[in-house]
C-alpha cells in the first residue's frame, strides 16, 4: 500500500464564499519536501439527474464564466449546512426549474478532483418529477430549461454539445446502475 503525504504546514492564500486556496508544505514518503503544493476547497454540491413523468431529462442551459460558454447541464447546486444531498436536490430542482415530487434515490458521492480539490459532489436521481410552482434563481443564475428524450441527450453527448465532465460521469453512473 502506498503511504500518504504528511502535512507540515498550511497557509491560506484565498478564503471566499466560493473558494479557499491553501499553500501546503508536505513531506512525501520518500523524504522529499514539497513547500508549494496548492489545494482548493469548495462547498459540497449536489447534481440532480431528473426525469419527468414523460421520461424526458431536465436539462439546463446557462452561462459558465470559467469556459465563457453556454453550458448544457443537469440541475445542480450547493448543499446548505444541515441539508442532506436529497434535501438539497429537492430544493435546487424547485428553485432552478420549478419541478418537484417524483421518486428520489441517492446514486453516490464523488471527489471533485482528487489531486487538488477537497470538495465533494453527490449524485441524486429523481424520476417522475412534475412541473410545480415557480423558479427562484440565485443572483448569479439565469437558466433556460429543456426537456430532452434519452436519445436527444445521448446525441448531444456524442456531438460534444453536452460535455461537462462531472455531468457525464453522473449520467454514466446512472446508466450502469440500470444494468
Image (cartoon, rainbow, N blue to C red):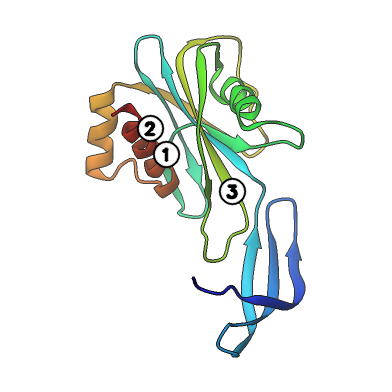
Name the mark on residue 170: 1
Tell me if 89 is positioned left or right of 127 in this view.
right
- Of the two numbered discs 2 and 3 on the same chain, state the one appearing first in sequence: 3
Residue 128 in percent (x, y) is at 44, 12
Image point (45%, 54%), residue name: 67
Q: Are the residues flagged by discs 1 and 2 in contact, CB closer than 8 Å?
A: yes
Residue 156 in percent (x, y) is at 27, 36
Identify which residue, 65 or 6, lies in the foreground.
Answer: 6
**Quarter where residue 91 is shown:** top right
Image point (58%, 83%), residue name: 29
Tell me if 159 is positioned left or right of 134 in this view.
left
Name the mark on residue 174: 2
Image quadrant where one finds the C terminus:
top left
Residue 147 in percent (x, y) is at 37, 20
User: Tag 1, which secondary structure?
Assistant: helix
Image point (63%, 62%), residue name: 40
Name the mark on residue 66: none
Q: Residues within 10 Å of mark 1 (few under 14, many from 20)?
A: many
Amino acid at each position: 500500500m502506498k503511504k500518504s503525504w504528511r502535512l507540515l504546514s498550511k497557509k491560506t492564500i484565498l478564503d471566499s464564499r466560493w473558494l479557499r486556496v491553501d499553500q501546503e508544505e508536505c513531506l512525501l514518503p520518500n523524504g522529499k519536501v514539497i513547500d508549494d503544493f496548492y489545494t482548493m476547497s469548495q462547498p459540497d454540491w449536489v447534481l440532480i439527474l431528473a426525469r419527468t413523468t414523460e421520461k424526458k431529462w431536465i436539462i439546463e442551459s446557462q452561462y459558465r464564466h470559467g469556459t465563457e460558454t453556454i453550458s448544457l447541464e443537469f440541475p445542480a447546486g450547493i448543499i446548505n449546512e444541515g441539508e442532506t444531498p436529497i434535501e438539497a436536490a429537492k430544493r435546487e430542482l424547485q428553485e432552478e426549474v420549478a419541478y418537484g415530487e417524483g421518486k428520489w434515490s441517492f446514486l453516490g458521492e464523488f471527489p471533485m478532483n482528487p489531486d487538488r480539490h477537497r470538495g465533494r459532489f453527490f449524485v441524486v436521481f429523481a424520476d417522475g418529477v412534475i412541473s410545480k410552482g415557480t423558479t427562484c434563481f440565485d443572483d448569479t443564475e439565469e437558466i433556460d430549461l429543456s426537456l430532452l428524450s434519452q436519445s436527444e441527450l445521448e446525441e448531444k453527448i456524442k456531438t460534444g454539445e453536452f460535455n461537462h465532465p462531472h455531468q457525464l460521469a453522473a449520467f454514466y453512473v446512472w446508466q450502469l446502475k440500470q444494468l
